[in-house]
Image (cartoon, coloured by chain):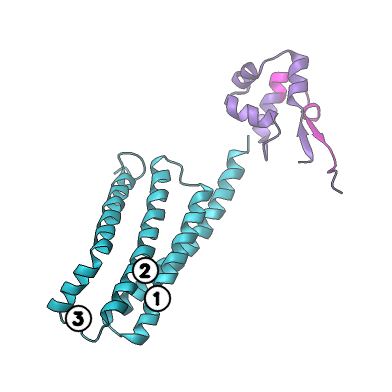
Amino acid sequence: MVIIGKNGLSAVVKYMLDLIAIGVAVILLGLPVLLKWCFDAYIWTVGENYWFLLVFLWVTGLLYLGIVYELRKMFQYLNQREPFRRENVASLRRIAMLALVISGMYIVKIAFYISFLTIVVAMGALLVGLLALILAEIFRQAIEVKEENDLTI
Amino acid sequence: MAIIVNLDVMMAKRKISLSELATRVDITLANLSILKNNKAKAIRFSTLEAICKALNCQPGEILEYLPDETE
């Protein structure tokens, strides 16, 4: 199976990221209506505050969109077969920051409205943030090695 | 960089063009340009050997050490 390139898995993942970005944007735009409907129809919103949840989901949703945007940028470079670029290190650091902020917000939310899903998302975001931080450092070292190799004639 | 590549001087002496040298040394023109313009970080012994053979000279005639001015 081809992993990297215009016909490879990375191209498919990039299209998936496009779809996710559109989906999240639509959900964020329709959030007031959607959330109202959830409050009317479901039980999981019992004990939650509508306005708090609305603002909370909007902010974390926007942060999540930021992560998708950075990932999309990285996959574009990957499709051009140029994965070792300094921009990718910056992208990974931003992803780490965004994910850690999301995780922090969810952990704060646990203190107000505790729910099982909140804990799952908080732990997931924390892991993504830490992994992205480590990947950024690995990428930085890889770029250094690649530059050294490219400039050895 | 304290080590300077004086490839152009030697090439002028031997009256050989960049592309011709690239063919004889069997490296790409782009890499030879990096070497000539002092942008290279390192040179393999095999490349140095091939250049010396093509230009019929010693490594010392191509490479030069200049102490850094900052000190």
Residue under numbered circle 2 = A59
Q: Residue at x 71, y 33 (%)?
A: B38
Residue under numbered circle 1 = A105
Q: Chain of mark 2?
A: A
Q: Residue at x 36, y 57 (%)?
A: A68
Inspect the image, locate mark 1, and give the three-letter code of the amino acid beneath it. Answer: Met
Q: Upstream in the sequence, badge 1 or badge 2? A: 2
Mark 3 burial class by Cα count in 10 Å: few <14, some 14-19, many 20+: few
Q: Quadrant of the C terminus of chain A?
A: top right
Q: Residue at x 29, y 77 (%)?
A: A51
- Asked which quadrant contains residue A126, the reply is bottom left
Q: Upstream in the sequence, badge 2 or badge 3? A: 3
Where are the magenta residues, as a range?
B52-68
Q: Quadrant of the N terminus of chain A?
A: top left
Residue under numbered circle 3 = A44
Q: In the rendering, at what x and y percent does residue A150 appear?
A: 58, 39
- In the rendering, what colour is chain B? purple
- In the rendering, what colour is chain A? cyan
Q: Upstream in the sequence, badge 3 or badge 1? A: 3
In contact (CB < 8 Å): disc 1 and disc 2: yes
